[in-house]
Amino acid sequence: MSIQERIPMREQAPEERVKNFKSVPLGYSAKEAVSEAKRCLQCKNPLCEVGCPVRMKIKTIINYIANEDYKAAFLLSKADNAVPAITGRVCPQENQCEGKCILEKQNKAINIGKLFAFVADWAQENNVVENLQINENGKKVAIVGAGPAGITCAVDLRKLGYKVSLFEALHMAGGVLQYGIPPFRLPRDVVDYELSFLEKIGVEVKLNSIVGQNVDFENLKKEYDAIYLATGAGAPKFLNCAGEKLKGVYSANEFLIRVNLMKAYKFPKWDTPIICGDKVGIIGCGNVALDSARCAKRLGAKEVYILYRRTKKYAPARVEEIHHAEEEGIIFKEMVAPCKMTGTDEGWVNGIQLMKTKFKGVDKSGRERPVNVENSEHVFELDTVVNALGTTPNRLFLSKVPELDTYNWGGIKTNDNFMTNIDGVFAGGDALTGGSTVIEAMGDGRNAADAIHEYIS
Ligand SMILES: Cc1cc2nc3c(=O)[nH]c(=O)nc-3n(C[C@H](O)[C@H](O)[C@H](O)COP(=O)(O)OP(=O)(O)OC[C@H]3O[C@@H](n4cnc5c(N)ncnc54)[C@H](O)[C@@H]3O)c2cc1C
């Protein structure tokens, strides 16, 4: 039987979209969504569901869409996923649900992410919301960090009747969804709408509340029946090489926070400045690197290079993002490793010294291991460098709770029930695993909510 091709997603044309920060995909129409859903084989044992960390009933949801029952599709998505409009847009589906789809063997996996985004957007346009009957149980849980892990845990516990207070250091909830992922991948009206659900169901969101600084951790332990730490991994890793402190060298965290959270792309309407030159080099090839590269392009850089020590075949970034970056003219300079930055007498970066790499053996991740080629140093001229080597948990918070057991690299240790060595204090998301994915963090949040419920009950 020949399988019909995926229904293509309409998108802003590359030459247009590099001039704005609006969503690249334009979303399925109802007719397109139904046609895409009808391609689903409705497998007896749906492998797509095995790949979903929040346990969504993917097969049934798709069947509802195929039958144009969008309301039922939405309510079933929302039962397991607090923010389906967000995960539909940013999940690396190729490694999860879509990667497991039986049609993937022919490169024609159902476009599950875009279908779920369609359904969630439809619900917003038609004012369809989950109508929850919450039976208060009189117990209180504090959640530290309002990123995907904290939000998911908050929603699940609230549905079980807990009084939930969500403490967030920043002036907005969302974590990386708000300060990291750019609006052309995740429009902010989508994030705002999804998060408005928290207050609708009675989660108390306490912004500008830094636990360990202006909120005392010991008091939380006294006031609440349990605490969930979902503080993420927001501290950048550095190369620790010469020239890294030159002007024009950013960590990806700073670059993306300026652009996305502090709206530097709207300067001078917004008052956050950002200096982005004509020739920009981004070190790394994960989602963070590609987001930085695509932001630099939109800020007006003429040439933007991804500097990567492997080939893009091994890149951790989402396939869709690599494809979009290439369409937008981002240049991939593969098999190079940075050694140091060079600068002008005035202290501005003007280049980066690179070494060529070659593959030798395989590393822990199962990927080819890059090693530097001797005597291959060469300087590559640039006027802005963004270091996107990855992130680690925030040490400042950990330093305020020295009794908390952590790994040397900063990850919080827990037992199989997600509880730390402190009784009643649980942890999850990137704070536990290091930089991961939105849906993995949400899966952690769900599992922790179950464990907290069991602990308190
Ligand atoms: C630029 C970028 C792009 C990404 N792209 C993708 C993608 O396309 N798809 C994908 O699946 N994943 C992506 N990721 C990874 C994903 O966003 C993270 O894995 C996920 O957000 C982790 O969720 P979290 O809740 O554990 O932490 P976070 O999202 O980091 O949230 C933690 C929250 O805790 C708050 N906090 C920290 N300390 C305190 C404190 N002491 N008191 C109170 N609040 C505190 C922080 O302010 C933050 O809001 C990306 C990450 C980045 C940085």
Image: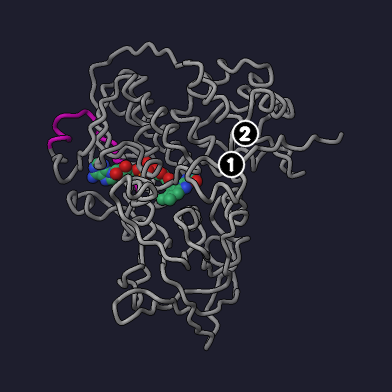
Q: Which residue is mark 2?
A: 112
- Residue at x 36%, y 76% (from the top left corner): 241
Quarter of the image with the N terminus in it: top right
- Residue at x 42%, y 71% (from the top left corner): 383
Q: Is residue 227 magenta?
A: yes
For the residues labelled 2 and 1, say whether their Cβ atoms are less than 8 Å apart: yes
Q: Position of residue 61 (x, y in %)?
A: 60, 23
Front-lying residue, 434 or 117: 117
Quarter of the image with the C terminus in it: top left
Front-lying residue, 219 or 405: 219
Q: Which residues are magenta?
A: 219-233
Dividing the image into four equal quarters, which quarter contains ligand 1? top left
On residue 93, which mark appears? Answer: 1
Residue projecting furthest to the front:
268
**Residue type at numbered disc 1:** Gln
Q: Position of residue 436 (x, y in %)?
A: 45, 49
Residue 79 vertical position relative to residue 409 in the rendered view, above or below: above
- Is residue 383 rendered to the left or right of residue 126? left
